[in-house]
Image: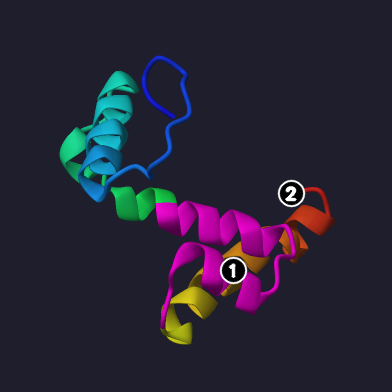
Amino acid sequence: MNRHGHIGATRVTAQTAVLVSKRHTARTGLDPEHAASHSLRAGLATSAATAGVQEPVLAEQTGYRGTAMLRRYMREGSLFRENVAGAVGL
């Protein structure tokens, strides 16, 4: 989707994803040098894992080739879902 809300026939390039990430990070008042498109990919993987998306589907759609990093995000996502402190109201 472009900045005018139109859906195109081609995917967004990695460079475009970086620029968008940096622009919106700057709008929050944070340093855009710490933002990258990897943050978007990692956040999607963590959120999808938290929502219960199975590993093969998650790997295929996010493009993770190895399972080590993917499983790390899945484990981090489960911290939100299976949190004992949250279960007791903390």
Relative to 34, say whether 85 is above or below. Answer: below
Q: Secondary structure at mark 1?
A: helix
Q: Main secondary structure of the magenta part?
A: helix
Disc assigned to residue 8: none
Q: Name the side, left or right, on which 56 lies relative to 30.
A: right
Q: Element type at marker 2?
A: loop
Crowd class of label 1 (few under 14; some 14 to 19; many from 20; radius 10 Å): some
**Vertical order, 90 against 60 (above or below):** above
Q: Position of residue 55 (x, y in %)?
A: 63, 77
Relative placement, left or right, of 85 versus 37 is right
Q: Which of the 4 quarters of the picture holds residue 32? A: top left
Q: Tell which circle, 1 or 2, labels the residue nearer the N-terminal end.
A: 1
Can you give x and y, in whole percent of width and height, for residue 41 in the image?
42, 55
The amino acid pointed to by label 1 is Leu
Q: Residue at x 47, y 18 (%)?
A: 5
Image location (x, y in percent) of residue 29: 28, 22
Name the residue tied to disc 2.
90
Indicate left or right for 52 with 47 as reference: right
Instruction: Determine which of the numbered discs, if any, sits on residue 58 in the image.
Output: 1
Say above or below: 59 vs 11.
Answer: below
Residue occupying image coordinates x 46% and y 21%: 6
Q: CA distance from mark 1 to mark 2?
A: 31 Å
Q: Amino acid at mark 2?
A: Leu
Span colored in magenta: 41-65
Q: Nearer the viewer, mark 1 or mark 2?
A: 1
